[in-house]
Structure formats: C-alpha cells, structure tokens
Amino acid sequence: MKIPGLSPSGSIRQRLILQLLVLVAVLSWMLYISVRTVASSAVETTQDAILGSATIAIAEELRGGDDGVGIDIPYTAFSMLGATGEDRVFYRIVIDGVTVTGYDDLPLSDDPLGGLTPIFYTRAYQSETVRIAAVERSVLVSNRPVRVVVAVAQTRSAQDAIVARMANRAAALGIGFFAVAALLSLLTARSVIQPVRNVAEAVRRRGPQDLRPVDRPVPSELAPLVTALNQFIARLSGALFRTETFIAEAAHHIRTPLATLRAQAEIALRQSHNEAARAAIRGMIRSVDDSARSVGQLLDHAAVVYRTDQRADEEIDLAALTRDVVAAFGPAAELREISFDLSVPDQPVTMTADRLLLESAIRNLLDNAVKYSALEGLISVSLLVEGGEARLSVRDRGRGLSGVRSAALTGRFRRGTNVADVIGSGLGLTIVREVATAHGGEFRLTEREGGGACADLSLPLA
C-alpha cells in the first residue's frame, strides 16, 4: 500500500534477505571449493601411496650379481595399481643411465632422488597426464655399486573419476547448505522485522483520540525509535490541547464584543429619529450579524476539523438527536413563519459517533434550509434506515442550486450565485461534508423536483 507523502527507499526485509543470501551463496561456494580441494588432495595422497608402494616393490626385487642386475618385476606391484581402476601403467628401469627395460621415453625426475623414498611428479606422456613415482637404489655388480632408477607411471582417469564424484557430492552438499541457510535467512529476516511490525500495528490500531505513549517491550535497537515516537506524540498532544483552548477562547472573545455591538446598535436605532441615521444603523446591524455569523461558522469549522482528529465517539440515538435539533430551530423558523414536517422512526436509531459533530452537521443543514426558504415555507425532515445505514434528508422549497454542481457548493467559502443577498459564510455545507467523511458516510446535495433543494446525509450504523 502506497502512503501519500511517503517516499519509500526500499525494504529493510528485502535488503536483509539479499545480504544473507549473498553471504550464504559465498559460504556455499567456499564449502564446495573446500570439500573439492580436500577430496582431491586425499585421493591424490592415496593414489600416490599406492603408486609409491608399487615402485618400491619393483626396486626391492632388483638383485645384483657377477653377470649384472637381475630384474624380476613382481605381479603384486601392478595388481595394486589395477585395484583402483582401469588406468594405463608405464614403467622404466635405468641402470647407470641406460634404460634396460620399460618405456625409454618415460620422463625421469629433474630433482635428485632420495633412495627408496619415492618422489612424485606429474607429466604429459603419450597424450595423457600421468602421475609418476621414482626411486633410486644401489646394487652391487662384481663388487661394484651400480645406480639403478625405477620409475612407474599411471594415468589419472580413475583419480579424476573419484574426484569428480566427490565434487558432485560437494556440490550437492553446498546446494543443500544453501537451501537450508536460505530458509533460515528468511526466518531470521522475519524475526528481525517483527518487532518493528509489532510497534507499527500497536500504533495503527489506536483511535484518533488515543495519544498515550507507546509502551511495548522492544529490542534495544528500536528503543531510540520508540522514544522519538513518544516525544512526537507528546508534542502533538500539547499542540492539539493548545488548539482546542484557542478555539474556545476565540469564540468567547470574538462573539461577546459583536453581541455587545449589536445590542448598542439596536438601542441607537430605537432612540434615533433621523431616517438617514436609522438606515445607516440598520446597515451596521446587518454587517454585525454577517460578521457574527461568519465568525461563528469559522469557529465551528475549526472545531469540526479539530474533532475529526480527536473524535469522542459514543453510542447515540440519531432519531432523538434529530428531534432535539429540530426543536431548537423552532423559534428561528417561527420568526419567518416556516414550519417543519418531521418524520423520524419511533424506535431508537442507534449508532456510534461523535455527538457534537453530528449535531453541528444537522444544525447546519436546518440553518441552510431555513435561511434560503421563502416566508411561510415548509421544510421536510426525514430519517430512514436502509441497508445498514441511516439517511437524514432535509428538503425545502427555497432558491435551489441554480444549476451549480454540488461539489462546488460544498467547497470552503463557496456560495451559489442566487444567494448574494442572504447572510452566509460558505462554510455550512463544508462542515456537513467533513462530518460525513469523518464518520465514513456521504453527503449529497441535489435539486428538488418542483423547486428547492434536497440535502441527504448518509451515515453507516455499524
């Protein structure tokens, strides 16, 4: 869900999961390389031990005599080499620098030999890579020591096959490790983010009027965030309290002087016998009434805006509230010989809402109807319950909308073109619309058939 005014810079959960997955992938790769390297080294060490044993077995069977060196290659030497696979085997025996048997082009070691301790090296031979073991020993021939070098080579097919199998197992182990670690990463990311979600959920479930500090156990890393949130709530609570106090004081300090000024003007009107002065005083009284009405509705609008954020919901009877407000408008309507046709259910119409907000909305609807109705007019007020909502309708036979759209008339300080001679501030319908919105309802203003206007305020009962 995209929140207006919020510019997300990415998800902490996604970043954490991505970082953990990258770390797991690196560790899995390192595990694969480690297992493959260890396996290759272990296989090569084992193969070298077998190859070295075969080479030593051949060297130990050499016998010296008066006629030369006797060579008897044991069968066990080659059977040991054949036990690990079907590799090709090559050998070479050199006496005093002369190859006497075997493959005379088999490479010898460039390093000095160390007796019967094999030296191992790898060379390319006959289009294959072979592993070679070489030993050296002295044999007495005619009481003279003769240097004999024995070299045995074996191809690496079996060794490579074993290493490949071990590598596949290492890869499977790495993939399994990655899968398990990835699952653990998801669970870890969820566990890390869960405290943040808990705090957000605790704040989200609160009503507009609940400005208590957040008091939940959180990890130490979230403590600065919760502290800052509580400090903000404290500042907001103080600002709202100052706003409410200012509205109440402004209503008192502005309305009282205007009422005093109007009373003094009426006294001057009764005492004056000059028609020009009396006309000027009447204009003054009209201006005072206009100002008082504008100031009153401005303060009412400010109060409504404040209370929509600080609603004090309670269980109320909308039918009884409608009767009370209509009865309160009786004297004002009688001055213009206007009567009310009230139709509300006898049984209670119960709903949970802010009583002062609804009372303000109903009062403004009736005030508009009385103000714009003709003398000796009739205003119909009805309350119906349909489909889980209550609809309050106020119908008059006044001036109507003159073709102006409802959305234009419910805007702040907007008035119709046909009511310029009537005192008004253009905030009455705005207040009704905002009260409806605050309670999840709807306000509609339409032309009434036969002349006049029809105002419908729909409010959900649940």
Image (cartoon, grey):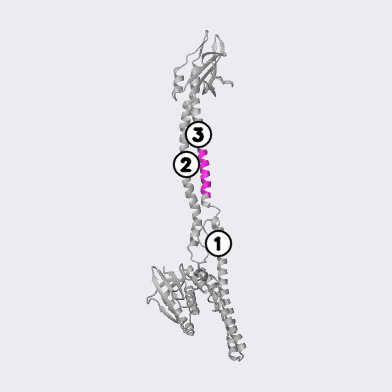
Q: Earlier in the sequence, mark 3 or mark 1?
A: 3
For the magenta stretch, what is the residue range? Answer: 15-34
Which residue ends up furthest to the top in the rendered image? Answer: 67
- In the structure shown, which secondary structural element does the residue marked by tag 3 occupy? helix
- The residue shown at (41%, 74%) is 383
> Separation of disc 2 and disc 1 at Cα?
41 Å
Q: Is residue 298 visible?
A: yes
Question: Magenta region, mostly helix, strand or loop?
Answer: helix
- Tell me if residue 230 comes above or below residue 429 in the rendering: above
Q: Which residue is mark 3?
A: 36
The three-letter amino acid code for the residue at tag 1 is Leu
Q: Please identify the quadrant where the C terminus is shown.
A: bottom left
Q: Which residue is mark 2?
A: 177
- Tell me if residue 153 comes above or below residue 141 in the rendering: below
- The residue shown at (58%, 74%) is 246
Q: Earlier in the sequence, mark 2 or mark 3?
A: 3
